[in-house]
Image (cartoon, rainbow, N blue to C red):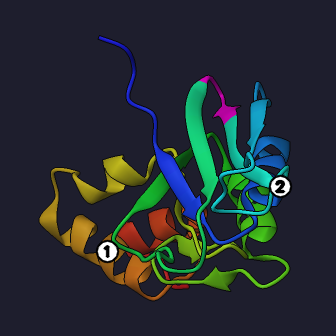
Amino acid sequence: MRPIVPNLWFDTQAEEAAAFYTSLFPASRIVTTVPYGPAGPGPERSTMLVVFELQGQRFTAINGGPQFPFTEAVSFEIPCADQAEVDRLWDALTADGGEEGRCGWCKDRFGLSWQVVPDGLEELMRGGDPERVRRATRAMFAMRKLDLAALRAAADGEPA
């Protein structure tokens, strides 16, 4: 079986979005663009779809019009190696019209939702001590961008 490929529906910004996303992640590239032909429905020779890869995962972006905007019902989780990577990606995704959400969720300027998650978060959320997990969870619910050091301190009962 061949891999599943997420297809992202944009109004008219598929090329811009693909260029932005491939600039954020190493080992990423635009594979091809396909223009609309004379049968439309978009203007002839305008971009119909863009195939791109983010760290080896293939995506398709289509310029399909305004009828299907993104919602938070679908998001992409970005596991980050360290706080510097969390900060870099969070800042890039929320810039130029993006929006901060709660608990490490944000939207980029195209309306696509992302979860920017530091390595170590899962360990804090499933640890053996329920009180430690509760403190970490409460701290996470108060955050927008996740700060792993602050979450660990909260889990350990240290003052903020």
Q: Main secondary structure of the magenta part?
A: strand
Looking at the image, which residue is at 49% across and 80% down? 67
Q: Position of residue 6 (x, y in %)?
A: 46, 43
At label 1, the amino acid type is: Thr
Q: Which residue is mark 1?
A: 137
In the image, taking residue 32 as reference, residue 70 lies left or right, namely left
In the image, taking residue 101 as reference, residue 90 lies left or right, namely right
Dots 2, 1 in contact, CB < 8 A = no
**Residue projecting furthest to the front:** 39
Is residue 28 positioned above or below 84 on the image? above
In the image, taking residue 23 as reference, residue 50 lies left or right, namely left
Quarter of the image with the C terminus is bottom right
Identify the mark nearer the N-term, 2 or 1.
2
Q: Residues within 10 Å of mark 2 (few under 14, many from 20)?
A: some
Residue 46 tag number: 2
Callout 2: helix, strand or loop?
A: loop
Q: Nearer the viewer, residue 72 or 37?
A: 37
Is residue 116 positioned above or below 36 on the image? below
Callout 1: helix, strand or loop?
A: helix
**Residue projecting furthest to the bottom:** 142
* Residue 77 on the magenta span: no
Question: Which span is picked out in magenta?
Answer: 52-56
Looking at the image, which residue is at 62% across and 22% down? 56
Mark 2 or mark 1, whichever is nearer to me: 2
Q: Residues within 10 Å of mark 1 (few under 14, many from 20)?
A: some
Q: Position of residue 49 (x, y in %)?
A: 67, 46
In the image, taking residue 151 as reference, residue 62 lies left or right, namely right
Question: How far separated are the C-alphas under marks 2 and 1?
Answer: 47 Å
